[in-house]
Amino acid sequence: MTSETIVVALLMAVLGGGCLFMTLLTLPGNWAMLMLVGAAQLWSLAGNGAPLYSGWTLLALFLLAVFGEVCETAMSAAGARVGGARARGAWGAILGSFAGALVGTVLLAFIPLAGTLAGALIGAAVGAFIGEMTYGDRSAMGLVLPAAAAAAGRMVGVLVKVGFGIAIWIIAVAGALWN
């Protein structure tokens, strides 16, 4: 362990913590953390020629980020299904969540840093509601449960993705120290 690796590990710990916060707000924090890892890897290769992280570690970090995305996306649909939604409601939750995150980032910008998360949750609920409404066999009150469950599922998905981000963060910091 050299002073350079200690500095890199400290930077990874601090900046990676900021990336975790970004992930909690449904921003691409896990991917930003991977970019930090890549920058640290390039720095180490340019400095002394020895890689900071092994190829297996880099692959594991990438796969953790991918699995986090898959889980986050699937959870809004799974939540809608638990709430009684059918296929269109589940797809509506997924598409509505993406659209809501984009709209929330712009229209809810007055909510400091949380507009994207609020937009994603509202979008998941609205998407599930509209998707279920297309069947035409339920009243509006009958569509509230799938919509609420879609929003809850999306929130659980965000928390699961943060869990994957924590794993990425720990591996990135520990990997820098163990070099």
Image (cartoon, rainbow, N blue to C red):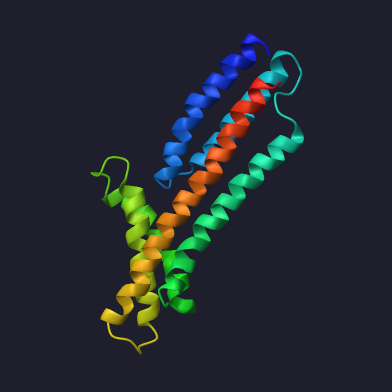
Number of dots carrying numbers: 0
In the depicted structure, whether residue 9 falls above or below residue 111: above
Residue placed at 63% from the left, 31% from the top?
38
| 70 vs 60: above or below | below
Q: Nearer the viewer, residue 54 or 45?
A: 54
Q: Is residue 98 visible?
A: no
Q: Is residue 23 left or right of residue 123?
A: right
**Quarter holding the N terminus?**
top right
Q: Position of residue 141 (x, y in %)?
A: 26, 80
Q: Is residue 127 visible to the viewer in this orientation of the structure?
A: yes
The residue at 27%/40% (across/down) is: 112
The residue at 35%/81% (across/down) is: 133
Q: Residue at x 33, y 55 (%)?
A: 119
The residue furthest left is: 110
Q: Position of residue 176 (x, y in %)?
A: 64, 23
58 left or right of 164 in image:
right
- The furthest residue to the top: 3
Residue 100: x and y in percent read: 36, 58
Question: In the figure, 160 relative to 58: above or below?
Answer: below
Q: Quadrant of residue 179?
A: top right
